Image (cartoon, helix red, strand yellow):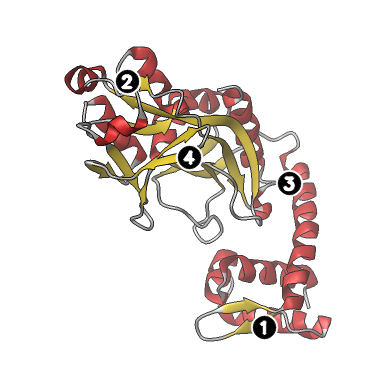
């Protein structure tokens, strides 16, 4: 039995939740994947996974084994990557996924700096507000706003962001500038956002000394965060977005920040990647660059 290959096969089965997908990722026949897992279970004397025709479920022993071997494999990959990359120019494909507003208004405007520094790294940008499965979809990293929900992933904070409530000068001239959150429900147009994955509407969020207040009713909504900015700039109403995204439009006078005392919700913007990807040389270079470039944004 090739012990290391068996461990890698088990690790990929867990991460893809499928024998078929694990085989495809490793470029092996499905029968080989099944054979190596069986040999690993026989070697350990324990059952690692429960298999049905549709699902793969870890046993308690399998979950503990996965946690332990993942750390060891990551260390091994780190050592091998360091040796491969020493003295060689970084090259190859790097897949990055991020929200459309962060892509269009934060990353893309500065991305030429990275490309000039590392011309042999091919960037593949997956742009959209749909959640992605990093392992199953072959994504190296994602850039997301908010707290890290999946504890199996690794996150590194790029900068602290906050919500900003804004509208175009033309809109405010026509409808007036609200002085209180309650004004939004009286004669104002609200631009909203709804989840591309679930269709659930996201409320406008405000904070007061007495607690949080939400505005859920909207007159027009989109499931694309870059389209939300365009709606606000063209005067469709009042809405909320990230301060880092709205910054250039506020500085240019295309948008005006309003209700600032009540809009103070903050959150991290992070680069997130799975443990098995953390040692990729291209990814390490991109992380170091983007942390340097966006720190204090």
Residue at 43 percent across and 24 percent down: it is 109
156 versus 3 height, above or below: above
Q: Give the mark nearest the N terminus, 2 or 4.
A: 4
The residue pinned by badge 3 equals: 81
Residue at 36 percent across and 31 percent down: it is 181
The residue pinned by badge 4 equals: 212
Residue 176 visible, this orientation: yes
Q: Give the mark nearest the N terminus, 1 or 2.
A: 1
Q: Nearer the viewer, residue 147 or 46?
A: 147
Within 10 Å of disc 4 (Cα), the crowding (few <14, some 14-19, many 20+) is few
Give the image quarter of residue 220.
top left
Q: Which mark is residue 271?
A: none
Residue farthest to the top, as pictured? 252
Within 10 Å of disc 1 (Cα), the crowding (few <14, some 14-19, many 20+) is few
The residue pinned by badge 1 equals: 35
Q: How many marks?
A: 4
Tell me how far mark 3 sits from mark 4, CA to CA: 48 Å
Q: Nearer the viewer, residue 286 or 297?
A: 297
Q: Quadrant of the N terminus?
A: bottom right
Tell me how far mark 4 sits from mark 1, CA to CA: 55 Å
Residue 285: image location, x then y, percent: 64, 34
Q: Give the mark nearest the N terminus, 1 or 3.
A: 1
The residue pinned by badge 2 equals: 255
Tell me how far mark 1 sits from mark 3, CA to CA: 28 Å
Foreground tag (4 vs 1): 4
């Amino acid at each position: 039995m090739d012990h290391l290959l068996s461990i890698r096969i088990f690790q990929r089965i867990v991460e893809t939740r499928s024998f078929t997908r694990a085989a495809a990722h490793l470029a092996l026949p499905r029968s080989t994947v099944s054979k190596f897992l069986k040999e690993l279970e026989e070697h350990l004397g324990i059952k690692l996974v429960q298999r049905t025709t549709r699902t793969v479920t870890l046993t308690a022993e399998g979950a503990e084994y996965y946690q332990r071997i993942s750390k060891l494999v990551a260390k091994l990959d780190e050592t091998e990557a360091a040796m491969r990359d020493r003295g060689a120019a970084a090259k190859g494909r790097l897949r990055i996924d991020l929200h459309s507003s962060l892509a269009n208004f934060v990353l893309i405007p500065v991305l030429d700096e990275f490309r000039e520094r590392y011309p042999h790294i091919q960037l593949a940008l997956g742009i959209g507000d749909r959640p992605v499965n990093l392992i199953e979809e072959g994504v190296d990293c994602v850039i997301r706003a908010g707290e890290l929900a999946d504890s199996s992933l690794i996150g590194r904070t790029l900068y602290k962001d906050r919500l900003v409530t804004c509208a175009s000068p033309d809109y405010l001239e026509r409808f007036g500038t609200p002085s209180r959150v309650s004004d939004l429900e009286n004669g104002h147009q609200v631009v909203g956002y709804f989840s591309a994955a679930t269709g659930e509407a996201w409320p406008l969020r405000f904070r007061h000394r007495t607690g949080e207040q939400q505005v859920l009713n909207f007159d027009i909504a989109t499931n694309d965060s870059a389209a939300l900015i365009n709606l606000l700039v063209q005067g469709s109403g009042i809405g909320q977005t990230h301060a880092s995204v709205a910054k250039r439009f506020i500085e240019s006078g295309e948008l005006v920040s309003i209700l600032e005392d009540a809009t103070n919700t903050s959150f991290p913007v992070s680069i997130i990647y799975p443990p098995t990807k953390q040692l990729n040389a291209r990814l390490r270079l991109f992380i170091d660059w983007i942390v340097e470039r966006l720190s204090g944004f």
